[in-house]
Amino acid sequence: MDEKDLLAERFQADRTHLKAVAYRMLGSLSEAEDAVQEAWLKLNRADISEVRNLSGWLTTVVGRVCLDMLRSRASRREDPLEYYVPDPVVRGTDGTTTDPEQEALLADSVGLALLVVLETLGPAERLAFVLHDMFAVSFDEIAQIVDRTPAATRQLASRARRRVQGAVPAPAPDVTRQREVVDAFMAASQGGDFEGLLAVLDPDVVLRADGGKLLAAASKLVRGAEAVIGQALTFARYRRAYRTVLVNGAPGVVSLVDGRPAGLMAFTVVDDRIVEIQILADPERLAALNV
């Protein structure tokens, strides 16, 4: 095995970890893949003869690539951020997978609700929070990426942490119970049962729908149980078939039209009440994600 083959083998060993870092940084599976590929190109061009910890070096490289991508995204974003739903990781309801990359993506319960809040952070704040709080990268190393002092970098992570803790609900740990609540919501929705819906929705529930460019009119942010019930009862008129899935480890539903995915719903359940519903209805992204 020559030096290039050995380097490729070392990179492959870190690939799932690197994509997990990039996914949390970017909230996009395709962009995460691009970031990992860019890290591979940089590795091939770099002199790593004095690099003692290649995994750590690659993590910081991916972090720097993602930071540049976030800054570029912020300067050209046209879609309203309040409607944006990050890319989900979808699995069958048994939760099993033989794909180590998916397991890495879902480690630490990185739910869609968390990714939605991460989208509201500035690029440097997001980097500091993700690398330090999720992957235990030191502030000294992060400071070199964001070109700030370690103390200033610590403040970035602290501000991000306060935003996250104040905005991300802690879901119930029992996924089986979560599923029962979601099943009750779907049954009440399809049955036009106003009281049944009211019983499973938190009074301050938030529904976020992302229709993308093709279904921009479907993008909306709805707050409050009665408003969400109105949306659910409108949806019920179409009587769409659906199947249950896990979305980033939490209960979800894929609605079907002629056997094809037409929308993906992810639910956050706290104290037997649904507090958040994220809906991805963007046909392009649904097709790209192979839901």
Image: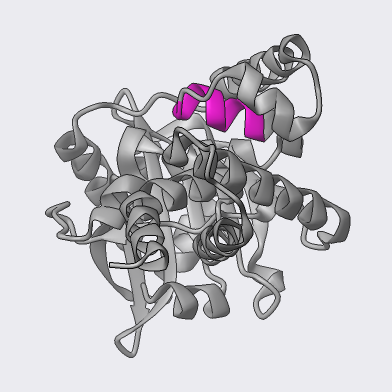
Q: Position of residue 250 (x, y in %)?
A: 30, 44
Q: Position of residue 286 (x, y in %)?
A: 47, 74
Quadrant of image for the N terminus: bottom left
Q: Name the magenta segment's main secondary structure.
A: helix
Residue 169 in magenta stretch: no
Query: Is residue 118 left or right of 70 when viewed as pictured?
Result: left
Magenta part of the protein: which range?
A: 127-135
Residue 194 in sight here:
no
Residue with the most extreme right position: 75
Quadrant of image for the C terminus: bottom left
Q: Position of residue 142 (x, y in %)?
A: 65, 27
Tell me which residue sits at (61%, 37%) in the image.
118
User: Can you say whether 188 is above or below 280 in the image?
Assistant: above
User: Can you say whether 191 is above or below 50 in the image?
Assistant: below
Q: Position of residue 193 (x, y in %)?
A: 34, 52
Tell me which residue sits at (34%, 33%) in the image.
108
* Quadrant of res 263: bottom left
